[in-house]
Amino acid sequence: IQQIVTIFVGLKKKNNLQHLDSMKRIIAPSVLSADFGNLNRDMEMLQRSQAEWVHVDVMDGVFVPNISFGFPLMKPLRKGTDKVLDVHLMITAPEKYVTRFVEAGADSVTFHYEATENIEECIDLIRKAGAKVGISIKPGTEPEVLDKWLEKIDMVLVMSVEPGFGGQKFMPSSIAKCEYLTKKKQELGLSDLIIEVDGGISAANSRLLFDAGAEALVAGSSVFGAPDPEQAIIDMLNS
Ligand code: DX5
Ligand code: ZN
């Protein structure tokens, strides 16, 4: 009996480990916090770094109370890296622009659940244009609203700050949302669905989010504000 118990425990451990092994850890530095006067230098740093994605925050001054940048910046970003360009649209009526962002070089386009009545149209347009599809929810939006869309998309972006500005304080309520989405992924067998979290993330909280099932973490000020940005990325990956 002891032998059987040992084998069983061994199998269980192995399964748990396999689960952990299959989890990805991706850091997506947000160029919103880069120095636009030294964009080439910052892009070279990202290119050398362990970051797999580059996060691109587009704001229209309507959906959020801030304006960042749009199509003209896509060109130098696409030229500056062969990493995944992860475009986060904080704009109203994203269906009007998603195709152009894919044409401009986006590998994934994430739009906000709260920004459109035409979710299905957005999903279809992004797919048709050939990019991965993400939907983002603001801190006040419950993840249940995405239940019916999870099977149709590649990624959920959980905001852990109110969208609009870099450098804000992390909201821990995002952790329970990751746990909910991780449970949903398991229930629905959607192991490829990526949970990404955005806002106030550093090596001080990255571990909590990875443990809750997040696989991609956006980090702006904690990377570009660090004395050694490449090391800041490594610290989050090793947290
Ligand atoms: C906020 C943006 C974030 C932001 C993150 O609206 O979506 O991507 O740049 O910046 P930090 O990491 O400084 O909170
Ligand atoms: Zn973002």
Image (cartoon, rainbow, N blue to C red):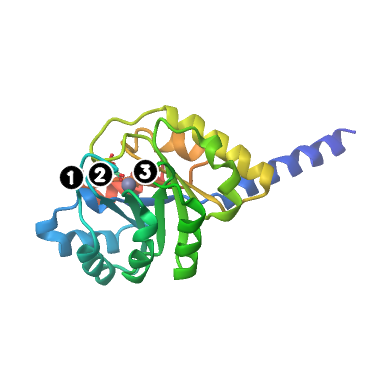
Q: Nearer the viewer, residue 146 or 220?
A: 146
Q: Secondary structure at mark 1?
A: loop
Given this view, does label 2 or label 3 mark the residue nearer the observer?
2
Q: Position of residue 126 (x, y in %)?
A: 45, 63
Among the 4 quarters of the image, the one containing residue 185: top right
What crowding class fits label 2: few (fewer than 14 Cα within 10 Å), some (14-19), or many (20 or more)? few
The answer for how far apart the CA atoms under marks 1 and 3 are is: 15 Å
Identified by mark 2, the residue type is Val
Residue neighbourhood size for the residue with mark 1, other residues' Cα within 10 Å, grouped as few (<14), some (14–19), many (≥20): few
**Three-letter code for the amino acid on which mark 3 is drawn:** Met
Q: Earlier in the sequence, mark 2 or mark 1?
A: 2
Quadrant of image for the C terminus: top left
In this view, which residue lies farthest toward the left?
37
Q: Nearer the viewer, residue 65 or 213?
A: 65
Image-quadrant location for residue 69? bottom left
Q: What residue is shown with label 3?
A: 236
Residue occupying image coordinates x 30% and y 51%:
29
Decide: is 171 above or below 151: above
Of circles 2 and 1, the one toward us is 2
Which residue position is annotated with label 1? 227
Check disc 2 and report its element: helix, strand or loop.
loop
- The reply to whether discs 1 and 3 touch (Cβ–Cβ < 8 Å) is no
Q: CA distance from mark 2 to mark 3?
A: 32 Å
Q: Which residue is mark 2?
A: 62
- Residue type at mark 1: give it: Pro
Q: Position of residue 139 (x, y in %)?
A: 39, 32
- Determine whether, in the image, residue 211 is placed left or right of residue 63: right
Q: Position of residue 21 (x, y in %)?
A: 58, 50
Tag of residue 169 = none
